[in-house]
Image (cartoon, rainbow, N blue to C red):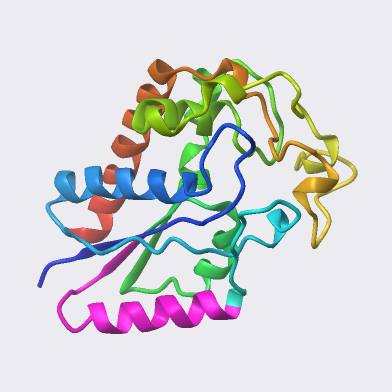
Amino acid sequence: MKHVILPIGSTEQHGPHLPLGTDTYIARRISEALATELRVDLAPTLSYGVSAEHVGFPGTIGIQPETMLKNVEGISESLFRHYQKVIIINTHGGNTSTLQKLKNGKIIIVDLFHTLKGILENLRETDVGGVCHACEAETSLMLYLTPDLVRKEKITEDIVKYVPQLDPQSKSPLPNGWKTINYSQSGVIGDPTKATPEKGKKIFDALIKKMSETLKTFLT
């Protein structure tokens, strides 16, 4: 039996310059590349995620963690009728802790933000600790993958470049129930002015290489 990839993103604000479906577009493009590389099948993308941190901005459509669990469990149950393993490619940080509850021998979860560790240090120009959103990295990926959807004229310097409370090393750690709007009126955390499509290609290629190497150890 073959394996199948299930991409999971979100529908939420990504500042004035990126589309609501940013995470979903990235999830799909990563999953398409991995499906080709690993010779596995590709399921339709799940475009709604756990997005409570972004509810202060219009356009954000989120679901509850328990709803996500039931949805993904039901989808996986259907897929297991025809596939040996389900590979979840998650590109939204708000989904991470919920999806980890599904991890087992048959469901493999690959998380974008865990994979990015060790990649961005040599590629990004900005020094932003902790959580980033619609930032240099995400904007670079979108400029490379879907440039027509990026509102380049909306990329400005009126953004939050560093939020100590969102830094894991901070003495004031990220509070439970935090909201993006309390830190950034634009919805951006990071510096998208440093984003380039060339940087996006490097990040994308590095992600595919690292993810495919990780997945090959589970699929052999």
Q: Position of residue 54 (x, y in %)?
A: 69, 54
Q: Viewer-proximal residue, 62 or 91?
A: 62
In the rendered structure, which segment of residues is drawn in magenta? Answer: 66-88
Q: Residue furthest right?
A: 171
Q: Position of residue 130 (x, y in %)?
A: 70, 39
Q: How many marks?
A: 0
Determine the residue positioned at 74% across, 27% down: 159
Q: Quadrant of the C terminus?
A: bottom left
Q: Quadrant of the N terminus?
A: bottom left
Determine the residue positioned at 27% across, 44% down: 212
Query: Magenta region's main secondary structure?
Result: helix
Is 79 left, or right, of 173 in this rendering? left
Residue 110, compared with residue 82, is above or below; it is: above
Determine the residue positioned at 44% across, 60% down: 47
Does the stretch in magenta take in 71? yes
Determine the residue positioned at 58% across, 53% down: 12
Q: Position of residue 151 (x, y in %)?
A: 52, 28
Q: Position of residue 78 (x, y in %)?
A: 26, 83
Is 188 left, or right, of 61 in this rendering? right
Residue 65 falls in image quadrant: bottom right
Does the stretch in magenta take in 210? no
